[in-house]
């Protein structure tokens, strides 16, 4: 099982984008492409940045169930993580995740009211490679 987790972490480290799914107001899945997490703690906790006015922020405030997916299309491998998501607007966490390139999206800097952090905490995952899947607990 440790080998599967290591392969999943390696795949995640090498992706520039990920896909974040929420449950919308009508109970349907809603998936968005996102820039890779700005910060992460192994396979357990991921921090992503987004706009407070984004549809997904409202969805996560209503229903915290979420799915985070990473895909290596060249080798047809992927990692799905299921868990919960929180919308964070605390100055300390915003500062921790901030990078200079963010000013392109948030001209007001890390205090821009449009800037927030999504904290995804996984509970389980599935790694897919070579036509086989392996489930794991995070």
Image: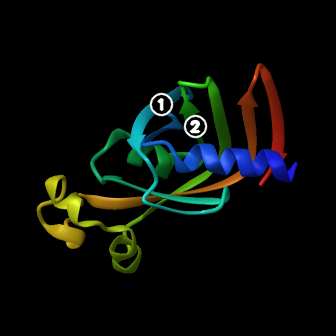
Q: Tell me if 137 is positioned left or right of 59 in this view.
A: right
Residue annotated with mark 2: 69
Residue displayed at 67% across by 56% down: 43
Residue annotated with mark 1: 31
Q: Tell me if 97 is positioned left or right of 101 in this view.
A: right
Tag 1, which secondary structure? strand
Q: Quadrant of residue 90?
A: bottom left
Q: Quadrant of the C terminus?
A: bottom right
In this view, the residue farthest toward the bottom is 92
**Depth order, front residue of 24/15:** 15
Residue 97, position as x, y percentages in the image: 38, 68
Q: Quadrant of residue 118?
A: bottom left
In this view, the residue farthest toward the front is 75
Badge 2: residue crowd in 10 Å (few <14, some 14–19, many ≥20): some
Asked if the residue at tag 1 contacts the one at tag 2, i.e. Cβ–Cβ closer than 8 Å, the answer is: yes
Q: Is residue 18 above or below residue 42?
A: above
Q: Quadrant of residue 76?
A: top right
Residue displayed at 69% across by 45% down: 8
Count of numbered tags: 2
Residue 48, position as x, y percentages in the image: 43, 55
Residue 5, position as x, y percentages in the image: 76, 50
Query: Is tag 2's residue or tag 1's residue first in the polypeptide sequence?
Result: 1
């Amino acid at each position: 099982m440790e080998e599967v987790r290591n392969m999943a972490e390696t795949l995640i480290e090498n992706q520039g984008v990920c896909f974040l799914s929420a449950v919308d107001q009508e109970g349907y899945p809603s998936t968005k492409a996102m820039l890779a997490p700005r910060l992460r703690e192994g396979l357990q906790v991921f921090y992503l940045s987004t706009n407070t006015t984004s549809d997904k922020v409202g969805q996560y405030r209503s229903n915290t169930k979420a799915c985070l997916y990473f895909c290596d299309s060249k080798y047809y491998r992927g990692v799905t993580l299921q868990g919960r998501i929180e919308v964070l607007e605390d100055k300390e966490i915003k500062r921790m995740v901030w990078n200079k390139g963010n000013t392109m999206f948030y001209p007001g800097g890390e205090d821009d009211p449009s800037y927030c952090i999504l904290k995804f905490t996984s509970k389980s995952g599935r790694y897919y490679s070579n036509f086989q899947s392996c489930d794991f607990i995070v």
